[in-house]
Amino acid sequence: MSSFAPALPATAVEDTRESSEVFGVPWYLWVVAFASESIIVGVIWDISWHRSIGRDSFWTPAHLAIYLGGTLAGLSCGWLVLQTTFASLRRERALSVSFWGFRGPLGAWVCIWGAVAMIVSAPFDDWWHNAYGLDVKILSPPHSVLAAGIYGIGMGTMLMTLARQNGASSSDRSRLLPLLFVHAGGLMIVMVTTLFAEFIMAPNGHHSVLFFLVTAATLPVLLVGISRATRERWGATGASAVYMGLMLTMIWTLQLFPAQPMLAPILRQITHMVPPSFPLLLVVPALLIDLIVNRISSESSRVRAICLAALAGLFFIGGLGFVQWPFAEFLLSDNARNFFFAADQWDYNSPPGMFQYEFWGRQLTAGAASWISVIACFSAVVGLLWGNWMRRVRR
């Protein structure tokens, strides 16, 4: 069944509101928003745990935070499906998707799938570590299953929020819905940058072709899609602020906790949890994207919309290079080796060397920059198409 439906009149929207709302937002949206936050915090915490301590048990606090979020998302959306199927008004069932005789919002089904994938990955991950030890790469087979589940819950949260936003009236009670969508979009940016962290997070690689290739391919599609789908005028900027705010909070919090390596080889002395690298300065290129995407109206021709989206991609990669290039040089300097910027903090099993203070990889050239610009433009156009699709989600 299609996930799209025409907007209901304001009176119909009011009739279908659940009685259990908080600040005009259905209870399940608050639950899945909290679940997504718990998962992301747990993932960042778990990566720091591996970098600082190693692995001593599956039942670490970081793992519990991850699977608490997955369980909450699965149970709340499962209850929502049962409620929609057996206890909802006819209009509520009409604004739902049928699966195996049950009915629920499209986003709820995606969240349930993500929760199942996360739960399935748990014993697989425990067995993998017992058999092969500490992960060398982020994307081991069990982590790939886990990542798919996490993305499912993140995308499901976005879809559930969009369904309410797109079908709601402009009354005061619905004003928080776009903000919740922007929050979910910011968490999705955290997920993507964490997934590709080994390519884009270390400042040593921020002058390389690989860094700009990965960011050009992955981030414009997200930022343009978020900017296009939300009712907030500064959606991409807000989502980037959520990403940076969460990452900075984790950086400053993790350093407060003592830690000691427990798995050989121990090549560095670690006294506290190793934080992630300072986040990318995405607010600046995201602001440029919002300025351009806001010029795409419902009356814009398809050619104009595509050209503006491509221009947004071009401005994104240009704006990112403008701010990140000098900032990477700063992060490799002595001035950034402090609590605030948390630079020059490495895994306990990483041998010390001059590589810590050098730029890595093939350095950016004019020819490579041209291809990267094309990729960024294409990514932004895909983001526009995705955003247009999200603007029509009603179920």
Image: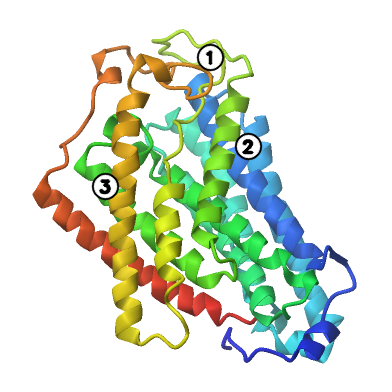
The mark that comes first in sequence, 3 or 2, is: 2
**What is the x, y in percent for residue 276?**
48, 30
Give the residue at mark 1: 262
Q: Place residue 335 in its image quadrant.
A: top left
The mark that comes first in sequence, 3 or 1, is: 3
Q: Is residue 75 visible?
A: no
Is the C terminus in the top left, top right, bottom left or bottom right quadrant? bottom right
Using a 10 Å C-alpha cutoff, classify the residue at mark 2 as few (fewer than 14 neighbours), some (14 to 19) or many (20 or more). some
- Dot 1 lies on which element? loop
> In the visual, does 160 lie left or right of 330?
right
Q: Nearer the viewer, residue 264 or 285?
A: 285
Q: Nearer the viewer, residue 334 or 146?
A: 334
Using a 10 Å C-alpha cutoff, classify the residue at mark 3 as few (fewer than 14 neighbours), some (14 to 19) or many (20 or more). many
Please tell me the numbered disc located at residue 212.
3
Q: Nearer the viewer, residue 130 or 315?
A: 315
Callout 1 amino acid: Met
> In the visual, does 321 lie left or right of 29?
left
- Dot 3 lies on which element? helix
**What is the x, y in percent for residue 184?**
60, 57
> In the visual, does 265 lie left or right of 188?
left
Residues marked 3 and 2 touching at CB (< 8 Å): no
Callout 2 amino acid: His
Residue at (46% x, 7% y) in the render:
269
Please tell me the numbered disc located at residue 63.
2
Q: Is residue 344 above or below residue 133?
A: above
**What is the x, y in percent for residue 174?**
75, 71
